C-alpha cells in the first residue's frame, strides 16, 4: 500500500510537484499520466527515496520513506525512466548482483529463473546488456524491479521501446502482478493506462488535474452529440449545409479519406442527436453518406483537454485532427 | 556491501582498468627493483619503495576516477540509491573494492623480496614497514579520489582533480618549506603525507600516524556520503 500525503518538491522557485495526495491499495494498479515535465518522474523519485520531498509524506506499507528509507525501499521494486543497467555485465550476472544488492532471501536460482522467464529474458541471459536491443534492455529493467518479489512496484514508462507484441506481454504481466502487488505505472500511451490501470491520476504542472477510475474519466465526457461522418460531395457546401442543422455547435472537415471524400467532425449541443438531421441533409443534396460514427471522447482527448485547457484544445483542433488522420 | 564490492571488482576487470593498473604498477615495481636491487646487487629494497610512492600518486586516480562518476553518467546511480542499502554501504563497498585492487598491486614487492631471500638476507621488517606505509597512504588517497569522483560525472575530470589533490598532499613539505615559522606552518606540516610516510618506512611505528591515515580515509568517505545525501536533499 502506498500513501502519499501533501507531497511537495521545490527546486528553488520552481514547483516541480505541488501538494499531491493519493492512496494506492494492495492489489491495485494506478496509472500516472501527464505531459513531459509534469512531475510524474519527480513524484516517483520521491516515492522511491531517490530524491527527498520538500514537504509532505510518502508511506510505503506504512513506512515513511524518509524516516526509515532502507526498510521502505526494501518493499519497492523500481524501474526508473532510464533502466539502471550496468551495460558491461551479462543479463544473468546483473540480475544476480541485484539479488545480492537487495539482500534477497528467496531461493536464489529458482527466483532468478522465475523472474527471467516472467520477463522473457532467459534466452539472452548470457549476453552482455550493451549488446541487447532496446526492448530487451527495457525488459531487463523490469526484471530487476521484480527481483526480491517486492510488494510495491513503481514502473516509470515500462513499455517504452518495446514492439507491440512485447508491449502486450508486459501489459499482461503487469496486470497479473497487479493482483497481488501495489503498482504505480506511468505512461505516455493512454490506451495502455486504460487497458491496465484500475485508477488514473492525470498530473500537470505538478498538481493532480484529475483522479478517478478509467471508466469514470471517460464517462465524464458525454459522447452522443459528437459524431464523425464520411460524406461524398463538395466539401465547402457540405460544411455549410451541416452548419445549418438546428442545434449544431460546429462542423469541420477532417482529412481526405478517399479521393475527394472527406470526413467531417461535428458537435451538437449536449443531448441533441443530429444523426437523423444529417441523413436528411445528405439526402436533400444527394450526397452519399458513406459512414457515420459517434466520435467517442477518448482518454487521449480527455488528457489533452485536461492538460491543455479547453481553449487551447479548440485552437489546436485542426492539428489534432491531422495527427489522428496520420494514425488511421 | 558485499554485492557492491563484488560488482565493483568485476567492473574493474571488465573495463580493463584492473589490467592496466596492475600491469603499469608492476612494470614500474619491476623496473625499480632491477635498478635499485639487481644492478647494485643489494637486498636493500628501500630505493624501490621510495619511487613507488610517486608512481601511485599517478596511478591511484585511475582506480578512483570511475567509482561514482560512471554511475552518475550511466544513470545506474538511481538503481543504487533506491535499493535497500545505506549510503555508507554504497560508498564503502566501492572504496574497499578500489583498496583491494590497490593492495593486490602492492603484493608484488613481496615476490621480489622472496626472490632476494634466496640470495641474501632480506630485512623483512623494512619490507613490511614500507608495505604498510604504502597501504596507508593509498587508503587515504583512494578516499580522496572517491570524493572527487562523486563530485563529477566525467571520469577524466575526476582523474585530473584527484591527481591534483594527491600532488598537493605530496608537495605539502615543499609548501611548508617556504612558509614562515608559526602556527599555520605547524598545522600544514601535520598534514604532510611524506613525513609520516617516511617515518613508517624508517620503522617508526607511531599509533598517531596510523590513526592519521585511517581517519583521513574515514573523513573523506564520510564527505562522499554527505555529497550523496546533499544531492538527495537539494
Image: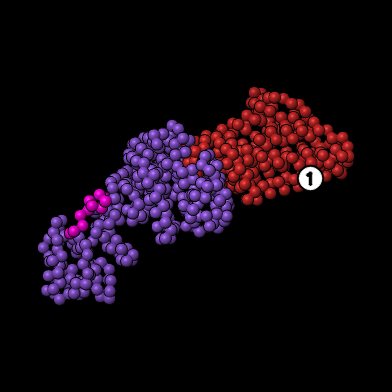
Chain colours: A purple, B red
Residue A280 x/y as whole percent: 12, 70
Front residue of A214 and B20: A214
- What is the quadrant of residue A160 in the picture? bottom left
Front residue of B116 and A128: A128
Residue A189 x/y as whole percent: 36, 55
Is B20 a magenta residue?
no
Is A224 a magenta residue?
yes
Q: In the rendered image of this protein, does residue A198 appear above or below residue B213?
A: below
Front residue of A307 and B179: A307
Region rendered in magenta: A215-225
Chain to which the residue tagged by mark 1 belongs: B
A202 displayed left or right of B63: left
A275 displayed left or right of A79: left
Residue A272 visible: yes
Residue A184 visible: no
Q: Which quarter of the rendered picture does the C terminus of chain A lie within?
A: bottom left
Front residue of A165 and A32: A165
- Report which residue position mark 1 lands on: B30
Q: Residue at x 73, y 45 (%)?
A: B25
Q: Which quarter of the rendered picture does the N terminus of chain A lie within?
A: top left
Q: Residue at x 81, y 33 (%)?
A: B124
Helix, strand or loop for disc 1: helix
Residue A50 x/y as whole percent: 46, 40
**How many discs appear?**
1
A51 displayed left or right of A221: right
Q: Residue at x 22, y 65 (%)?
A: A293
Residue B157 x/y as whole percent: 59, 46
* Crowd band around label 1 with a 10 angstrom C-alpha radius: few (<14), some (14–19), many (20+): some
Q: In the rendered image of this protein, does residue B125 appear above or below residue A11?
A: above
Residue that sits furthest to the top in the current view: B183
- What is the quadrant of residue A271 in the picture? bottom left
B126 displayed left or right of A254: right
Amino acid at each position: 500500500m502506498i500513501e502519499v500525503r501533501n507531497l511537495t518538491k521545490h527546486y528553488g522557485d520552481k514547483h516541480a510537484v505541488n501538494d499531491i495526495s493519493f492512496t494506492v491499495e494492495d492489489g491495485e494498479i494506478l496509472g500516472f499520466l501527464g505531459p513531459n515535465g509534469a512531475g510524474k518522474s519527480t513524484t516517483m523519485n520521491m516515492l522511491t527515496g531517490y530524491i527527498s520531498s520538500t514537504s509532505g509524506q510518502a508511506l510505503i506499507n506504512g513506512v515513511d520513506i524518509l524516516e526509515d528509507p532502507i526498510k521502505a525501499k526494501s518493499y519497492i521494486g523500481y524501474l526508473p525512466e532510464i533502466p539502471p543497467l550496468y551495460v558491461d555485465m551479462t543479463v544473468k550476472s546483473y540480475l544476480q548482483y541485484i539479488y545480492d544488492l537487495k539482500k534477497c532471501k528467496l531461493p536464489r536460482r529458482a527466483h532468478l529463473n522465475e523472474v527471467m522467464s516472467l520477463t522473457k529474458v532467459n534466452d539472452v541471459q548470457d549476453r552482455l546488456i550493451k549488446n541487447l536491443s532496446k526492448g530487451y534492455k527495457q525488459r531487463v529493467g523490469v526484471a530487476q524491479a521484480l527481483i526480491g518479489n517486492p510488494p510495491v512496484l513503481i514502473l516509470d514508462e515500462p513499455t517504452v521501446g518495446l514492439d507491440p507484441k512485447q508491449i502486450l506481454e508486459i501489459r499482461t504481466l503487469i496486470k497479473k502482478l497487479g493482483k497481488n502487488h501495489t503498482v504505480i505505472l506511468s505512461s505516455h500511451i493512454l490506451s495502455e493506462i486504460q487497458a491496465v490501470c484500475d485508477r488514473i491520476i492525470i498530473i500537470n504542472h505538478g498538481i493532480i488535474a484529475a483522479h478517478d477510475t478509467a471508466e469514470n474519466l471517460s464517462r465524464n465526457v458525454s459522447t452522443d452529440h459528437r459524431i464523425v461522418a464520411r460524406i461524398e460531395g463538395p466539401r465547402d457546401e457540405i460544411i455549410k449545409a451541416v452548419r445549418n442543422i438546428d442545434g449544431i455547435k460546429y462542423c469541420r472537415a477532417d482529412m481526405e479519406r478517399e479521393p475527394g471524400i472527406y470526413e467531417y467532425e461535428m458537435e451538437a449541443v449536449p443531448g441533441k442527436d443530429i444523426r437523423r438531421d444529417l441523413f436528411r441533409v445528405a439526402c436533400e443534396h444527394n450526397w452519399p453518406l458513406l459512414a457515420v460514427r459517434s466520435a467517442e471522447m477518448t482518454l487521449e482527448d480527455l488528457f489533452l483537454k485536461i492538460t491543455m485547457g479547453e481553449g487551447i484544445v479548440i485552437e489546436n483542433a485542426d492539428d489534432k485532427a491531422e495527427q489522428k488522420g496520420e494514425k488511421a | 556491501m558485499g554485492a557492491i564490492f563484488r560488482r565493483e571488482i568485476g567492473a574493474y576487470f571488465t573495463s580493463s582498468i584492473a589490467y592496466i593498473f596492475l600491469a603499469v604498477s608492476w612494470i614500474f615495481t619491476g623496473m625499480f627493483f632491477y635498478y635499485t636491487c639487481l644492478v647494485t646487487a643489494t637486498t636493500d629494497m628501500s630505493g624501490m619503495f621510495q619511487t613507488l610512492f610517486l608512481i601511485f600518486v599517478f596511478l591511484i586516480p585511475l582506480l578512483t576516477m570511475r567509482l561514482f562518476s560512471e554511475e552518475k553518467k550511466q544513470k545506474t546511480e538511481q538503481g543504487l540509491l533506491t535499493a535497500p542499502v545505506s549510503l555508507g554501504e554504497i560508498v564503502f563497498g566501492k572504496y574497499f573494492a578500489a583498496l583491494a585492487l590497490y593492495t593486490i598491486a602492492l603484493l608484488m614487492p613481496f615476490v621480489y623480496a622472496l626472490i632476494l631471500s634466496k640470495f641474501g638476507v632480506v630485512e623483512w621488517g623494512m619490507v613490511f614497514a614500507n608495505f604498510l606505509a604504502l597501504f596507508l597512504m593509498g587508503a587515504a588517497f583512494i578516499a580522496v579520489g572517491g570524493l572527487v569522483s562523486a563530485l563529477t560525472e566525467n571520469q577524466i575530470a575526476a582523474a585530473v582533480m584527484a591527481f591534483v589533490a594527491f600532488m598537493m598532499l605530496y608537495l605539502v613539505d615543499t609548501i611548508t618549506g617556504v612558509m614562515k615559522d608559526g602556527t599555520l606552518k605547524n598545522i600544514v606540516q601535520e598534514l604532510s603525507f611524506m613525513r609520516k610516510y617516511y617515518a613508517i618506512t624508517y620503522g617508526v611505528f607511531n599509533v598517531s600516524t596510523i590513526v592519521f591515515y585511517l581517519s583521513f580515509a574515514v573523513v573523506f568517505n564520510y564527505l562522499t556520503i554527505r555529497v550523496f545525501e546533499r544531492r538527495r536533499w537539494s
